[in-house]
Amino acid sequence: MRYIIIGAGAVGGSIGGRLTESGHDVVLVARGAHHEALRDHGLRLTTPDGTRVHRPPVIERPDELELRADDALLLSVKTQDSVAALDAWSVRPVDGGGTAGERLPLVCAQNGVESERLALRRFRHVYAMCVWLPATHVEPGVVSAAGTPYTGALHIGRYPSGTDETVTRIAADLEKSRMLAPVVPDPMRWKYGKLIANLANAVEAVSGRLLGDEARDLAARTLAEGRAVLAAAGVDAVSTAEQDEARALMSFDPYAVPEGGGGSSWQSLSRGTGTIESDYLNGEIALLGRLHGVPTPVNEALQRVANTFAREHRPAGSLPIAELLRIIDAGV
């Protein structure tokens, strides 16, 4: 099986690097300066066990690659970029006939719960992956991943539910590549649990790491609002205890993370991408709250502030927590 990593940033680069390291056939897909660095100098992946440079093929566009019947597509772009990627890749022809959307498996290795729905409109064979993989896109061509002795915990199953031979093969390849990859029949239950944990990403992105009581209290309010919404919507999500138990086999090495680094939303702001995934994290809770009559003022405010930061290219972590609280409490 050949793996096409669509979005070889922090998560995609870590997975693609580890798969390459264990001898699997991998193609990395990236854009702009990151694509140029990967093409010219390879992927420099740093983990707690050292730094390695991997040189799998690198492309920027789908038409640069002839797809094979044994390909698996792993989508690891941010959700706000999913539609463009899915549209571009789903129509590509596959050797032997048909298109990628008709024949190839597509794995959504992303935060949030929306990309699977977007993918299923375009792909027949969609798989959901709950990603817990602490990693940083340090600079073009360079990725740092802090998990040890496993780089990530990746619960994977068919979307919307179930398992099959394909997902079992993918999981086995990941397990051989220094990652935990439990095959589960209910992957969206895991992704909804991760969604709750990701709601505080916006707090970190605009105000910095959650170090003080005020920041931690705001994060708790954000998560509590999310849990209330999922309960009202009748959505089942794994508990924090279940997640902790599943990840007990790996730990986090802070020395493997660049100083000042943060989560995925913080990284989007720090790189000045102009977009952030809050519409599909805090915005998912706002959406469900409106559908089920549950007020979500904290998540709505965080979604609005995070989007403003991204649109205006404001520095990550530059809003004092007291000011963020003032904005949020003004709308509660």
Image (cartoon, rainbow, N blue to C red):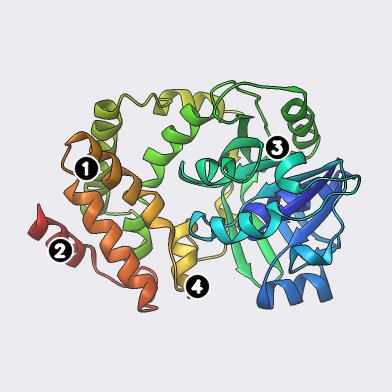
Does dot 2 land on a helix, a strand or a loop? Answer: helix
User: Which is more foreground, mark 2 or mark 4?
Assistant: 4
**Residue ID for mark 4:** 273
Q: Is residue 262 left or right of residue 103?
A: left
Quarter occupied by residue 275:
bottom left
Distance CA(mark 4)–CA(mark 3): 28 Å
**Residue ID for mark 1:** 290
Distance CA(mark 2)–CA(mark 3): 40 Å
**Marks 2 and 1: CB-CB under 8 Å?**
no
Q: Is residue 311 left or right of residue 247?
A: left
Coordinates of residue 274 in the picture (x, y in percent): 45, 73
| Disc 4 residue type (three-letter) | Thr
Choose the circle earlier in sequence order: 2 or 3. 3
Residue 74 seen in the figure: yes
Which residue extends farthest front? 97
Q: Is residue 161 above or below residue 70?
A: above
| Disc 1 residue type (three-letter) | Arg
Choose the circle earlier in sequence order: 1 or 4. 4
